[in-house]
Image (cartoon, rainbow, N blue to C red):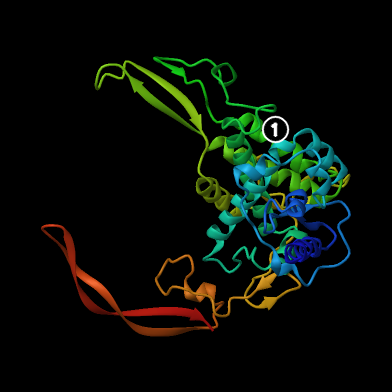
């Protein structure tokens, strides 16, 4: 009985998480059959921000219950075509894609979480902190068309591309894709050959593009912006690929090498996209509304890997749930010159509090034979700074 109630509450919770607004929807990938049969005793769903053409009417008061849990390999094996019917919020085009490519569904969830976690890391020392833990606030950014929206679109697209490419190379979607082989990568020049298996970036890009573009109609300015920025995320992943080689032959000679392409780490992609975010180009729809062009005639034409936005961002200094700002009251900052979270900038000129404390810490540690490390205890003064 308790198990039944537990399952029921999770089903209601997932339904309650379906969020609102005209373009943003938090999608619950709910493993309904596993919950109902008792295969798992906890909710196994993950939240992904996907855009829909219509959206839903109201935002749930239970949005804070979102859980992002990685699925184990055994759970991934239980995903079938029928799972696609239980995924809330997909467009009809995405649902058709899902039924055809359901083996990649788990990778999409993993990739979206990977991208959003990187978003948090990149912005932890900025006024806007990518607050995915506060869905009602975070969703406001996704409803907009600001620089922050552009970054979220691009890093989520990059994460999904990486996860799908990795899933293909590991053989987790063997009926759809596999490793990239030498014939696909081109003919090498010099004393090296392709190894038998490279990370499959081509299929990662293809499947990511098909799925994410399946939510866009390509007619509205915000849809055109989303298509461009998600493609920029994929472009950065491709340009960040590394060729890794291993030498063969007598010691030190490296008479021959075998090489393969390796996916970049998400933090490498996140850093590159952060630079693109700082240089994001404001655009407006052309007269025929089929294309976006720079607002200023003097601005450069956006390249495929540039980020673009339609709306200016708020300053994020004060709390304003309407625009998705938590404000910077109580945020940690640094008085060090040149710090990314310098107190003058983070605190918007309001000033900051200084807290001093004395910690007892290990110090003057030395190794004694044999075999232990002996340390003294020292009183160390520490300071912390928070915005007023």
- Residue 95 vertical position relative to residue 328 in the rendered view, above or below: above
Q: Identify the residue at horizontal 87%, vertical 47% (top origin).
A: 287
The residue closer to the viewer here, 16 or 270, is 16
Asked where in the image residue 128 lies, by quadrant, the reply is: bottom right
In this view, the residue in front, 211 or 279, is: 211
Give 25 or 296, whichever is nearer the viewer. Answer: 25
Q: Residue furthest front?
A: 1
The residue identified by callout 1 is: 206
Query: Is 142 left, or right, of 326 in this rendering?
Result: right
- Quadrant of the drawing holding the C terminus: bottom right
Label 1 CA crowd tier, 10 Å (few <14, some 14–19, many 20+): some
Q: Residue at x 51, y 49 (%)?
A: 267
Residue 55 is situated, as x and y percent measured from the top left of the image, at 86, 57
- What's the residue at 66%, 32% (across, down)? 173
Residue 331: x and y, percent?
53, 75
Q: Is residue 5 above or below residue 91?
A: below
Question: Judging from the image, what secondary structure is the residue with disc 1 in?
Answer: helix
**As drawn, 155 above or below 99:** below
Q: Position of residue 106 (x, y in %)?
A: 67, 43
Residue 56 in view here: yes
Which quadrant holds residue 135?
bottom right
């Amino acid at each position: 009985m308790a198990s039944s109630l537990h399952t029921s509450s999770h089903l209601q919770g997932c339904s309650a998480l379906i969020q609102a607004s005209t373009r943003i929807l938090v999608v619950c990938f709910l493993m309904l059959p596993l919950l109902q049969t008792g295969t798992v005793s906890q909710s196994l769903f993950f939240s992904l921000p996907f855009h829909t053409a219509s959206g839903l009417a109201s935002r749930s008061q239970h949005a804070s219950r979102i859980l992002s849990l990685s699925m184990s390999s055994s759970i991934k094996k239980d995903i079938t075509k029928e799972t696609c019917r239980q995924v809330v919020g997909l467009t009809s085009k995405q649902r058709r894609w899902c039924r055809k490519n359901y083996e990649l569904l788990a990778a999409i969830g993993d990739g979206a979480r990977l991208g959003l976690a990187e978003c948090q890391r990149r912005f932890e020392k900025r006024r806007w902190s990518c607050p995915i833990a506060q869905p009602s606030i975070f969703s406001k950014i996704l409803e907009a068309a600001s620089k922050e929206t552009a970054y979220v679109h691009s890093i989520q697209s990059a994460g999904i591309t990486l996860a799908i490419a990795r899933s293909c190379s590991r053989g987790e979607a063997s009926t759809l894709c596999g490793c990239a082989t030498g014939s696909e990568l081109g003919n090498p020049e010099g004393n090296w050959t392709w190894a038998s298996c490279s990370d499959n970036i081509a299929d990662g890009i293809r499947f990511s593009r098909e799925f994410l573009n399946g939510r866009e109609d390509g007619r509205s300015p915000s849809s055109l912006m989303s298509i461009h920025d998600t493609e920029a995320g994929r472009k950065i992943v491709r340009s960040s690929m590394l060729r890794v080689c291993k030498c063969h032959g007598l010691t030190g000679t490296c008479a021959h090498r075998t090489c393969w392409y390796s996916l970049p780490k998400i933090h490498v992609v996140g850093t590159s996209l952060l630079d693109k975010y700082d240089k994001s180009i404001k655009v407006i729809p052309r007269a025929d509304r089929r294309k976006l062009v720079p607002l200023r005639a003097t601005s450069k034409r956006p390249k495929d890997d540039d980020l673009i936005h339609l709306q200016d961002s708020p300053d994020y200094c004060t709390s304003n749930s309407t625009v998705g700002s938590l404000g910077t009251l109580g945020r940690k900052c640094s008085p060090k010159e040149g710090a990314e979270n310098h107190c003058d900038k983070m605190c918007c000129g309001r000033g900051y509090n200084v807290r001093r404390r004395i910690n007892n810490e290990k110090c003057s540690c030395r190794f004694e034979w044999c075999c232990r490390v002996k340390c003294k205890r020292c009183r160390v003064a520490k300071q912390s700074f928070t915005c007023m």
